[in-house]
Amino acid sequence: MTTKLELETALKEAMRRGDEQHKRTLRMVIAAIKLAEVEKGKTADEPAIAAILQKEIKSRRESIADAERAQRSELVTENLADITILESYLPKALSQAEIEELGRAAIAEVGAKTVKEMGQVMKVLMPRVQGRAEGAVVNQVVRRLLE
């Protein structure tokens, strides 16, 4: 079952149960996927859907930081619940060791020796880890390997 189909099925289940949190979160992510499909003019593949899920999770984390500064604990709780729901539809995350292994392979493939060549390494590596690791984490690992 594709992730998109899984999300749509989960939305129907949430509607049957009357689960407002799941309903709202799933509708939002399905709408984001459909928007991306319209913009690109083709159906979203699994890596694209994973990227959309990651983007939505990142957005929620930023909202949590804003809500904490505004001392709005109910918004923090709501966004944490959204993140939990969204993460359940992501592929299994890569471990630090797996990211390092992929990073070493990309560095060898590009032939990078210094941090100045990090952009070339990231260009090769990011499509391989899409949806399974955050860009900031991958960036830190590659930087450490090149230093």
Image (cartoon, helix red, strand yellow):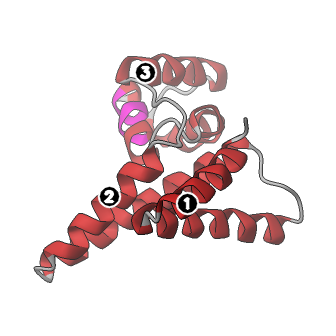
Q: CA distance from mark 2 to mark 1?
A: 19 Å
Quadrant location, the N terminus: top right
Q: Which residues are magenta?
A: 139-144
Q: Within 10 Å of the Cα at label 3, are there few (<14), some (14-19), or many (20+) other Cα atoms?
A: some
Label 2 amino acid?
Ala
Label 1 amino acid?
Arg
Q: Which residue is mark 1?
A: 16
Left or right: 80 in relation to 41 = left
Name which of mark 3 and mark 2 comes first in the sequence: 2
Please name which of the two marks, 2 or 1, marks the residue nearer to the observer. Answer: 1
Question: Residue 5 appears at what percent x and percent y?
Answer: 72, 47
Residue placed at 62% from the left, 51% from the top?
Answer: 7
Q: Within 10 Å of the Cα at label 1, are there few (<14), some (14-19), or many (20+) other Cα atoms?
A: few
Name which of mark 2 and mark 1 comes first in the sequence: 1
Please name which of the two marks, 1 or 3, marks the residue nearer to the observer. Answer: 1
Residue 100, label in figure: 3
Quadrant location, the C terminus: top left
